[in-house]
Image: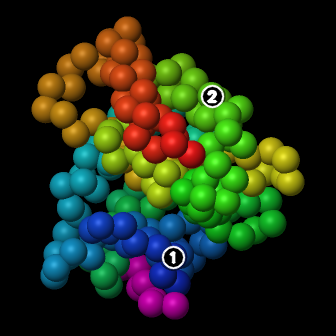
Amino acid sequence: MLILDDKDFIAKGNERACYLHPDDKNKTVKVTYVGNKRQISKQSQKEISYYKQLQKRGIKNWKHLPQYFGEVKTNKGDGFVLELIRDYTGEVSKSFAYYLKENGAKAYEKELEVYKQYFLDNCIIFNYGMMPKNILLRKNSQTDFDLVLIDGLGDVSHFTLPNKIPYFARRRISRRWDKFVNKYLKSK
């Protein structure tokens, strides 16, 4: 069992919190914190299942997703281990929402196009939870950045069979991408 210390808290979303892995500063542990839940949430189950599908498919390029390292039991409940996204300086990467507020979407047109193409090329489905606060901007250098999806991976719709057929998966990705752009980037 991993013992997670409050001093290692990184961030939290609506129902999950992330902690620095106690044995590896390059990994994070994501656990459910809503109410007194000590087990993996449905959101986490879907995310874990999708990570396992990606591993089974043999995805080698994790440039825009944190790499998945498996499930774990902790003193704060069941969780799973992911790569901790850090800038070239060693700092934990900040949210894309932070940078959008600072610089606007126009400053990241190239990164957004590469990001979109990554999902299309690899037929990786993201859900409607993809929003700027669930994306990190990793600084590889002063001028080279990657967008990394840390929450909202996988599909929450009930009918997911089309996701297994590249043509239909890409159509779904394109539709969701357009909604993401219209909702979060058009006015920036």
What residue is shown at x 37% (from left), y 15% (from top)?
171
Q: Nearer the viewer, residue 103 or 139?
A: 103
In the image, the segment drawn in magenta is 1-7
Give how far across and how far down residue 154 sits, in percent.
Answer: 33, 38
What residue is shown at x 46% (from left), y 73% (from top)?
11
Q: Which mark is residue 10?
A: 1
Q: Main secondary structure of the magenta part?
A: loop
What residue is shown at x 30% (from left), y 67% (from top)?
14
| Kind of element beneath mark 2 | helix
Q: Mark 2 is on which residue type? A: Glu
Q: Mark 1 is on which residue type? A: Ile
| Kind of element beneath mark 1 | strand
Give how far across and how far down residue 149 sits, in percent.
Answer: 50, 47
* Crowding at mark 1 (Cα within 10 Å: few <14, some 14-19, many 20+): some
Q: Residue beneath label 2, please?
A: 113
Q: Which mark is residue 2?
A: none
Left-right relation of 26 to 30: right
Q: Is residue 38 above or below residue 123?
A: below
Distance from disc 2 to disc 1, alpha carbons, whole Å, reads 28 Å
Q: Is residue 174 above or below residue 73?
A: above
Q: Quadrant of the C terminus?
A: top right
